[in-house]
Image (tube, rainbow, N blue to C red):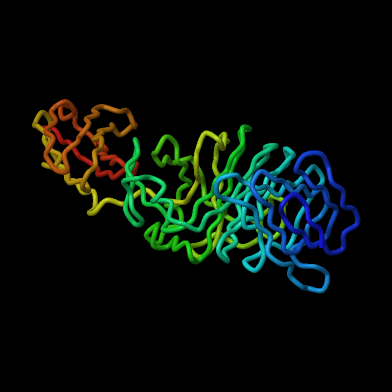
Amino acid sequence: MLKAKGFIINLVLVTVCTFVTGQILHAQLHTLSNLHVSGNTSFTIPGSLNFANANGALPGSISTAKAGAKGFINFAEGSDWTGASDAQFINGYVKVLHDNPFVFPIGSDNKYRPIAISGGANTSAAYFDKSPAKLVGKTTAGKSTSTASADLQLVEKGYWNLSGKQATAITLTWDKEAAIGTLTEGEVSNLRVLGLRKGKWEVIPATVDKQTLNAATHQLTASGQSSNLVSGSISTTTEVIPSEYKYFTLGAVRTAVGETTFSVYPNPSLARLPLNIAYELPEATKGTVRVYSALGSLLVERSISDTQGVITLSEITTVPGSYNVTITDQTGKTFSQQLIVVAE
């Protein structure tokens, strides 16, 4: 047993252990046991950390201070870890000291929920098994939160604090307890990465990984298993500077009640007669009506903001032929119908 700057460390298979200036302890080790890093303290790993040793035994708890002054477990250049799982992870802040892609072996309250980056020295991360909705004063769990571009539904529990000044792609993970099926209405493709900035959750462009992140190693690799509603990962398609956001979580664009419907009449229509487009949109939405020629040229474009109504057009019915009428709603979905205009 070794005491160092306010915390106790049990080291197994230790080859080197030396104190360094300040509050940083360096250790070359294979297995850690019962380690808690207090606030304003760092524990740097320059070698390998195995969450299960050769005999299959699991180490004790590994944690850092998460509230107030933070503690950090650092991974230096050339360091690595293996074997993290729901049974063993780091409950607290992990910092990477190099620019290589890295998976943070973090979790909370018996849940392993890693996050990964494509690279960024001095980036740190911690996971919190709490409601992300409560991070915004006027929202509550299960309710949507309004942003500049859409209404969003937040995952019930789970968010990450990711800090760093270098731009990086980010990969978030989920398990069955995240209830992604309920969140996305059974369509995993509806899942989104959200970042909390200036008190509002924002959608960060991302795609669901076809093969989920390999969460058992520090390397940014695929596991060979497909992402699905029970478990998987989603990666941003653009690099972001983590410290520009306070927290990150999972969400979905809120699906409005009802379906977008519209009809075109009369159809077929006689040339030079007005054309009517009756529409009904989901609540609290807006859209755009467009009419295209048979060759794909845009002839008419009108914005609509009411949930239902009728638009009367006369501009396109002077020439007989085939036309394509579309309505695109606020979520980006486009619906189309063919219009036939005949000679008088």
Which of these two is toward me, 292 or 68? 68
Residue ID at (27%, 39%):
326
Which of these two is toward me, 114 or 254? 114
Residue 287 position, x and y percent, is 25, 37
Q: Quadrant of residue 188?
A: bottom left
Residue ID at (65%, 40%):
123
Q: Is residue 109 above or below residue 37?
A: below
Residue 321 position, x and y percent, is 22, 34
Count the labels in the image.
Answer: 0
Q: Is residue 310 above or below residue 45?
A: above
- Image check: 297 left or right of 14? left
Residue 40 position, x and y percent, is 66, 43
Residue ID at (34%, 35%):
148
Q: Quadrant of residue 336?
A: top left
As drawn, the residue found furthest toward the right would be 15
Q: Is residue 338 above or below residue 178?
A: above
- Image check: 69 left or right of 260? right
Identify the image quadrant of the C terminus: top left
Which of these two is toward me, 81 or 224? 81
Residue 1 position, x and y percent, is 82, 63
Residue ID at (24%, 54%):
257
